[in-house]
Image: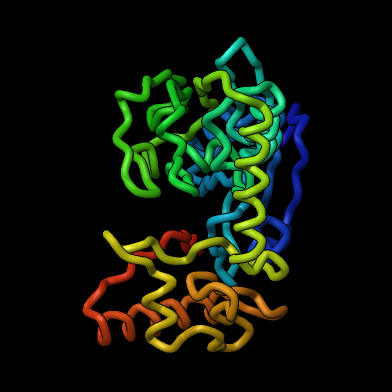
Amino acid sequence: MTWQGMRGRIEHRYPLQKLNTWRIGGLAETVCWPESEEELREIWFKCQEQGIPFRLFGRGSNVLFPDEGLSGVTVISTGLAQSVWDSEWVTVGAGYSLARLSQEAADRGLTGLEFARGIPGTVGGAVVMNAGAHGGSIQDILEEVKILAPEGEVQRLAKEDIQFGYRECSLRDQAIVLEGVFHLKPGDPDVIQATMSENLARRKAAQPLELPNAGSVFRNPPGGSAGRLIEEAGWKGKRLGGAQVSSKHANFIVNQGNATARDVLALIREIKKDVHHQFGVELKTEVRYISPS
């Protein structure tokens, strides 16, 4: 593939460890950081024409990259970080930091994004996984998305055109999110900031933020807590290779410095099997493993 005319950064044989919060993964054949939607579309079209694998990520806060690395083109969306505020509405690029957007909303006295202040991902990823915390989620404030459809057309979808579930939506694996439009409401700036500060403090107290991790590994089962089940099954603090179930929060797997994807996958497999054996509960992963093939 030729890269003439591309303004965004391009790297070859780039360590995937640098592209995710778990700090795990082999080498990516090619990594691109497009600086506009047009560049992203151009890369996508070239990959489609030439049969080259195309994968899009943001800050890599909810993924596990393979030890074998990734072939084809890995695209990082963080260059798509435009934002336009219009009273209670904001239009934001897919690569925009969700935590930054939350703080900017608070600075403007707008409520609705307090739940997102500590979430480390991007707007695009947050939409696709219906990110949430502290009783709030993206679907509560999303009004519209701009997508690159499977046929290569740019489309706009209203929230009503998207099906949302717990940590998922119908856009996953079906379209590329380019932009989100959110509607917030006026609120008391002091109350908004106090709520965010409280959420951040709770997050710091409960989660192993001092070690590389990818957030909650498993979805909470209906009416229950994955972390509580894992702890009651005796897995808190247990380790396989360089991957360890956090001694702070059992639904987190941390990288103790040399963890591989193989370590993490083995730990996930054993936890799922044991929790099902002891409690009859089938845990489902929230993090996404990216297959090398």
Residue 20 shows up from this direction: yes
Residue 87 quadrant:
top right
- Height in image: 165 above or below 16? above
Counting from the top left corner in percent of width and height, residue 146 is at: 48, 23
Instruction: Residue 288: give x, y in percent of width and height.
Output: 46, 59
**Height in image: 70 above or below 163?**
below
Query: Compared to 121, does 89 lie above or below?
Result: above
Q: Is the image coloured rainbow, by chain, by secondary structure, or in one colour?
A: rainbow
Nearer to the camera, 200 or 61: 200
Q: Which residue ends up furthest to the top in the rendered image?
A: 86
Q: Residue at x 56, y 27 (%)?
A: 111
Q: Residue at x 72, y 68 (%)?
A: 210
Vertical order, 168 against 114 (above or below): below
Name the spot of residue 228 as percent of width and height, x first.
41, 74
Quarter-of-image position of residue 203: bottom right
Which of the pair 289/5 is nearer the observer? 289
Q: Quadrant of the N terminus?
A: top right
Left or right placement of residue 11 versus residue 153 in this view: right
